[in-house]
Image (cartoon, rainbow, N blue to C red):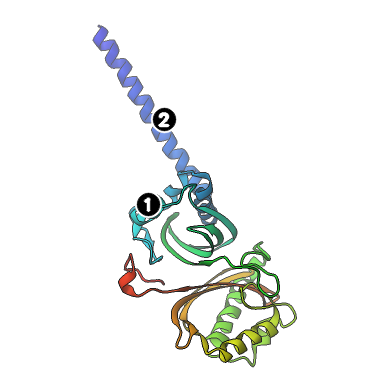
Amino acid sequence: MKSILQACLLAITLLSVSCNSLKDSNSQKKVEMELSNKEKVVALLNSFNTGDQTPISYINPEKYIQHNLSVGDGLAGFGEVMKNAPEGGFKANVVRAFQDGDYVVAHTEYDFFGPKAAFDVFRFENGKIVEHWDNLTEVTPPNPSGRTQFDGVAEVSDLDKTDDNKKVVQRFIDEVLLNGKMDNITSMVNPGHYHQHNSGVADGLDGLGKAFEYFAANDMVMVYDKVHKVLGQGNFVLAMSEGKFGKAPGNHVAFYDLFRLEDGLIVEHWDVIQGIPAQSEWKNENGKF
């Protein structure tokens, strides 16, 4: 009789544990469904600060394609980076973020082996992160106009103008950056209101012109060879491109340019330029783009 009673108690205990586990699992799925993809990315990056492990579940463990060439593919590669974190861990401050379909873009201030300015791009499938691109550079002092790599407008607005704004940026890249046609630049960039966050360039079209003059005088090049993605939401548009930058003939680099638009014109610009290492140094085979 005693053994029967013990067996019944054990069955009840196991059933309770199983129900609680199922309840926790269902609760987690409900939370994931309620969060937008943008909110999941912000939570994931913020977990560097909090140590919360929950946002790791937003990454698909079976498929995580990594385009940071210094990191191994999949969750294993992500785990290796975390194991090498300095004392106190990494820190992340998401300054601005937006969503374009299955893609989420985050402009982030990191303490990641030193202060870094970065853009992260995540792609989702069925609510899970399956792919990641990024571009990082050192944090620098304010530019000649006193602007930093992070300040400026952060609020996403003008959601009804997303497609039109993406077309303006695509045209600016095609005509100005890819082909050097400056004649019609004022039809794309506001000549009286253009805030620049590049560390070495001042505000306005005058600041941009002086930067090009400096490049020419110092045998430097900034060449855009190919645009890989143009992602946007409302007043923000990010272009991911590759080309050459630096002393002629220039180094192979990735250009990430973030533009803010008002009334159909570009009025603000942030960027990160990062060198692309030789393929022999890559820790994954997915390529930068």
Q: Residue at horizontal 62%, vertical 89%?
A: 213
The amino acid on which the numbered mark 1 sits, given as a three-letter code, is: Gly
Q: Residue at horizontal 55%, vertical 85%?
A: 177
Q: Earlier in the sequence, mark 1 or mark 2?
A: 2
Q: Residue at horizontal 35%, vertical 52%?
A: 61
In what element is the residue under mark 2?
helix
Q: Quick check: can you spot residue 168?
A: yes
Residue designated by label 2: 20
Q: Is residue 184 above or below residue 266?
A: below
Q: CA distance from mark 1 to mark 2?
A: 29 Å
Question: Which sits in the foreground, 109 or 257?
Answer: 109
Q: Position of residue 58 (x, y in %)?
A: 44, 51
Q: Nearer the viewer, mark 1 or mark 2?
A: 1
Question: Which sits in the foreground, 254 or 115?
Answer: 115
Q: Quadrant of the C terminus?
A: bottom left
Residue designated by label 1: 79
Q: Position of residue 287 (x, y in %)?
A: 36, 71
- The image quadrant of residue 16 is top left
Question: Which sits in the foreground, 205 or 163?
Answer: 205
Q: Position of residue 211 (x, y in %)?
A: 62, 84
In what element is the residue under mark 1?
helix
From the viewer's perspective, tell me whether residue 231 is left or right of residue 260.
left
From the viewer's perspective, tell me whether residue 100 is left or right of residue 287.
right
The amino acid on which the numbered mark 2 sits, given as a three-letter code, is: Asn
Q: Is residue 71 above or below residue 262?
A: above
Q: Is residue 270 above or below residue 34?
A: below
